[in-house]
Image (cartoon, rainbow, N blue to C red):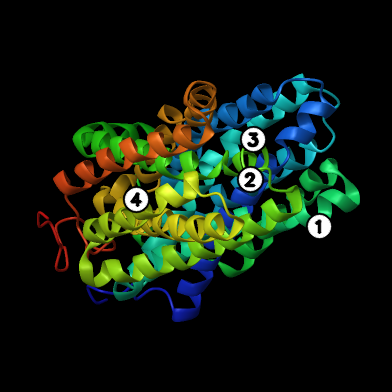
Amino acid sequence: MTATANAGLSHSDQMHAVTASFLGWTLDAFDFFVLVFLVDTLAVQFHVTKAAIVWTLTATLAMRPLGALIFGVLADRYGRRKPLMANVVFFSILELLCGFAPNYAVFLGLRTLYGIGMGGEWGVGASLAMESAPEKHRGILSGIVQSGYSIGYLLAAVAARFILPAWGWRAMFWIGGAPALLAFYVRFRVKESEAWQQHRAPTVGGIVRSAAGHWRVFAYLVLLMTLMMFLSHGTQDLYPDFLKTDRHIAPPMVSYLAILYNVGAVLGAVAFGHLSESLGRRRSMIAALILSLLAIPAWAFGESLALLAIAAFVLQAGVQGAWGVIPAHLNELSPDEVRGLMPGFAYQLGILFAAGTNTIEYVLRDHVGYSWALAGFELVNIGLLTAVLALGKEQKGKNLYQGQGLVTRPSTTTL
C-alpha cells in the first residue's frame, strides 16, 4: 500500500463509494429543498401563516445534530455502509409520509423527524467517499460530493416547475420516497472503507472518549460549520420567497432562476474543490467567499430579472465553491478513529446553532426590508468566516489510511 492511495479498493470501487455519497446527499437535499418552494402553498393548505411553515424548516435543521450523533457513532462502530443504507431508507420513508400529512401538527412532526435522517447522511457519506478517494483527486471529488446538495436543490426546482402544477404539493413529497432505492446500490456495489477497518473502535464508549480527547479540534470545526451554515442557508432558503414577494417574479420563473443559480453552485463546488489541491483548502475557500461578496449588491438589490439571475449564479458559485472544499477539509482535520462521527457531528451542530437563520432573516425583513435582511446578514457572516479560516489550520494531503502518525505532505501553513 502506498501513502497516497487506498490500495484495497480498485478504481471502480472508489468511484462507487463516491457515487453513493454523492447520490445520498443529492437525494437528501432534494427532500429538504422541496419545502422552500411550497411555503405559500402549505400555508394555505394547513391554514397557518407563512412564518409557521418557515418554522418547519428550522425544526428540520435543529434535529440534524441528533441524526449525525446517532449515525456517526454507528458508522465508527459498525462501518460506513450499513448505517448509510439505514439512513437513506429512514429519511426517504419520512419524506414519503409528509405527502400524506392531514394537518400542520402532523406535518411539523414529520419534518422534525426527517431532520434526524438528513443529519445522519452527510457525515457517513462524506467519510466513506473521502476515505475511498485517491489522495491526489480528493479535492475535486470533495467538490463533486458536496455539489450533490446543489443538484438536489436544482431537482427540487425542476419538480416545483413541472410536478407541482400537474399533480399538486403532495406529489412533491411522494417522489421523495424514491431515494430508498439507493440502499440497494450501496448494498451490492459499495465496499466497506479500508480506513475504518484499520481504525475501528471496539466500543461506543471508546468512540466517545476519543472524540472528547480532541475537543479543541471539534470546537473549531463546530464554529467553522456554524458560519458555513449561515452562508448557505442564509443565501438559499428564503431566496425563492424573496424573488416572489419582493421582486414580484412569477413562480415558474423563480423555479427557472433556482435551476440557473444551482448550476452555478455545482460548477463552483467542483472548480474550487479542484483548486484546493493546488491553492490549499483555506485559501480556496476564502477566494470563493470573495466571489460571493462581490455578487451580494446585485443579488439583493438588483431590479431587473437579468441582473438578479447573473448575480444569483455568481453568488452561489462562490457559496458552494467554499462548500465544495468542506468534505475533504473536515475529514483531513478529524482524528482517524472518529472520522465517521466528528465531521458529521460538527457539521450538524453547526446547523443547530444556525437553525434560526431563516427566522432571523424573516424578522429582519420586517424591520429593514427583505433586501437588507439578506445582504446585511451575509456581509457580516462572510467577514467572520474569512477571519476564522485565516486563523485556522489545514492538513491537505493527509494520509487517511495509515494513521495520523503517517501524513503525506500535510499543509498546515498560515495564510
Q: Nearer the viewer, residue 358 or 125?
A: 358
Disc nearest the viewer among 1 and 3 = 1
Dot 4 corresponds to which residue? 293
- The disc at residue 153 is none
Snapshot quadrant of residue 51: top right
Dot 2 corresponds to which residue? 33
Dot 3 corresponds to which residue? 114
Q: Position of residue 249 (x, y in %)?
A: 69, 47
- The disc at residue 162 is 1
How far apart marks 2 and 3 lie (CA) works out to 12 Å
Q: Nearer the viewer, residue 93 or 161?
A: 161
How far apart marks 4 and 2 lie (CA) works out to 24 Å
Snapshot quadrant of residue 161: bottom right
Of pointers 1 and 4, the one earlier in the residue sequence: 1
Given contact means CB atoms under 8 Å apart, are the residues at marks 2 and 3 in contact?
A: no
Q: Residues within 10 Å of mark 2 (few under 14, many from 20)?
A: many
How far apart marks 2 and 1 lie (CA) works out to 15 Å
At mark 4, the secondary structure is: helix
At mark 1, the secondary structure is: helix
